[in-house]
Image (cartoon, rainbow, N blue to C red):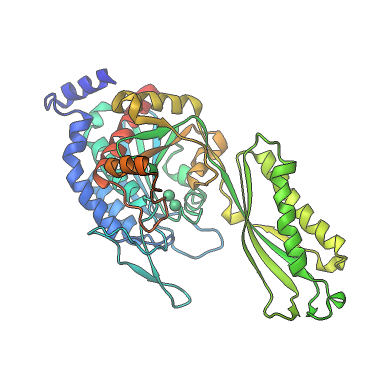
């Protein structure tokens, strides 16, 4: 790394000060302004029109070949706001960097001077507040900063840099939409895929990475427990789906605890249960919404089969007619695969981050049962990829919380307010050093 910094200075011939660090410092004010603009103007999943346009304009200005509206949502005529910026810079590897662009239906309570006051009018006529509560504004600003700097220092690397502004991450739809619109066929199949996420549990100035499992696979499952409705006073003439649904929820609890090997991480959660209209009416059916998280395809299949078996078993035990069996629907368009960071690549990046930021500022991330559709870009492991984290908490706030034991606002919280300057500085430095290393090592 030291060699590269020296090389950078001599080749760019702008003196010793022009290391990656000093170039980042020079960009920081402008990137911070961009960040505040994006933060104040968040857009919900599927509506990232202005954010996408901003990325496109900025990357064009920086010399990238930019294509907008990349992506095709399944079963939908909705416009996809995917942006692809490509900088071809001689022969060498193709590296993809992805930033997600969408915000959340959260009413901001950070008190920041650039807080969002944006709202969205839902299909039902409700006014929905919008906030960048997951740090995707950091990711957008970082992508633009990295794009500018990699173009400025193009003498220092050879290859193709592909920058992606991805919509609809929070809905698990954007990455798949872009890939199914022939992303790799149109713009080239990357040799390496990189992405980062703001971390609400670590101080700004730190970077987290780990080889192997990083984010879990996600499935969304709709279950309809069907019975035969009737009068609440004559339950013997009905087949009560409320009682069956209650049994079903409890039966699900033994899938992970009794059927999955104890060392395999897995979650089955019932997030919604809905049925009935009145005290004394036994309804015809009850609807449930479940989510399943795992890291292992075999375990995932086992759990999905067990959910069906439990539902059917309970219906059979209640003597429900065969044409009233439950319906278990695994939503094909809401599946996200697990992210496994490529071992060699993640170890390499960890090493670089330790050199750049100091060992004490690099932490090992723990696998989470949360999902991230970044995992799609690796094509099931065919392409080496690494998803790392950048601490976002103001260091003073972090230190105080460590002492007081106070809980810091998590991602998706209305009070999540990253230390923008230090987070952006760290994110840009981390991604640029990662890219320079990847370009030079392949
Ligand atoms: Zn999120
Ligand atoms: Zn996120």
Picture residue at 32% right of the left edge, 28% below the top:
436
Is 398 positioned to the left or the right of 308 in the image? left
| Residue found at the very far front of the displayed protein | 404
Quadrant of the rendering where the N terminus is positioned? top left
Q: Is residue 356 above or below residue 196?
A: above
Quadrant of the rendering where the C terminus is positioned? top left
Q: Position of residue 250 (x, y in %)?
A: 72, 56
Residue 86 appears in view: no
Q: Position of residue 37 (x, y in %)?
A: 25, 57
Residue 211 appears in view: yes
Picture residue at 81% right of the left edge, 81% below the top:
233
Picture residue at 49% right of the left edge, 31% below the top:
384
Could you say which quadrant of the image residue 203 lies in?
Answer: top left
User: Quick one: 215 or 30, which is closer to the camera?
Assistant: 215
Is 354 positioned to the left or the right of 301 in the image? left
User: Quick one: 2 or 216, which is closer to the camera?
Assistant: 216
| Residue found at the very far top of the displayed protein | 3
Is 5 positioned to the left or the right of 179 in the image? left
Q: Is residue 103 above or below residue 127?
A: above
Q: Position of residue 241 (x, y in %)?
A: 76, 69
Q: Position of residue 288 (x, y in %)?
A: 66, 63
User: Quick one: 401 or 125, which is closer to the camera?
Assistant: 401
Query: How many numbered badges does the structure rendering display?
Result: 0
User: Quick one: 64 or 301, which is closer to the camera?
Assistant: 301
Is 301 positioned to the left or the right of 72 in the image? right
């Amino acid at each position: 790394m030291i060699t590269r910094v020296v090389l950078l200075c001599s080749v760019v011939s702008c003196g010793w000060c022009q290391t990656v660090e000093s170039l980042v410092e020079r960009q920081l004010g402008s990137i911070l302004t961009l960040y505040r603009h994006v933060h104040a103007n968040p857009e919900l999943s599927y509506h990232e029109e202005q954010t996408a346009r901003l990325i496109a304009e900025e990357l064009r200005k920086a010399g990238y070949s930019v294509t907008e509206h990349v992506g095709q949502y399944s079963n939908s005529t909705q416009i996809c706001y995917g942006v692809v910026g490509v900088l071809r810079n001689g022969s060498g590897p193709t590296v993809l960097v992805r930033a997600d662009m969408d915000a959340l239906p959260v009413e901001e309570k950070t008190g920041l001077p650039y807080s969002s006051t944006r709202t969205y009018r839902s299909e039902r006529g409700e006014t929905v507040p919008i906030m960048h509560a997951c740090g995707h504004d950091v990711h957008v600003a970082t992508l633009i900063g990295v794009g500018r700097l990699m173009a400025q220092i193009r003498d220092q690397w050879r290859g193709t840099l592909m920058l992606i502004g991805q919509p609809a991450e929070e809905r698990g739809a954007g990455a798949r939409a872009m890939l199914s619109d022939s992303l790799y066929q149109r713009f080239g199949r990357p040799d390496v895929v990189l992405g980062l996420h703001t971390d609400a549990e670590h101080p700004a100035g730190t970077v987290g990475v780990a080889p192997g499992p990083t984010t879990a696979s996600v499935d969304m499952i709709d279950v309809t427990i069907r019975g035969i409705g009737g009068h609440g006073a004559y339950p013997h003439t009905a087949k009560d789906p409320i009682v069956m649904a209650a049994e079903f929820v409890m039966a699900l609890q033994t899938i992970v605890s009794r059927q999955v090997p104890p060392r395999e991480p897995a979650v089955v959660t019932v997030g919604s249960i809905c049925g009935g209209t009145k005290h004394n009416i036994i309804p015809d059916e009850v609807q449930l919404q479940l989510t399943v998280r795992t890291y292992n395809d075999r375990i995932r299949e086992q759990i999905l089969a067990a959910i069906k078996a439990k539902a059917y078993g309970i219906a059979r035990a209640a003597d429900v007619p065969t044409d009233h069996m439950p319906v278990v629907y695994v939503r094909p368009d809401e599946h996200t695969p697990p992210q496994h960071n490529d071992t060699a690549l993640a170890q390499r990046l960890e090493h670089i981050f330790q050199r750049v930021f100091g060992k004490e500022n690099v932490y090992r991330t723990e696998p989470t049962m949360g999902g991230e559709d970044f995992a799609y870009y690796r094509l099931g492991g065919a392409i080496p990829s690494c998803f790392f984290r950048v601490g976002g908490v103001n260091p003073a706030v972090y230190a105080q919380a460590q002492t007081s034991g106070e809980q810091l606002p998590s991602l998706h919280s209305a009070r999540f307010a990253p230390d923008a300057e230090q987070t952006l500085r760290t994110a840009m430095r981390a991604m640029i050093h990662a890219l320079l290393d990847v370009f030079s090592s392949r």
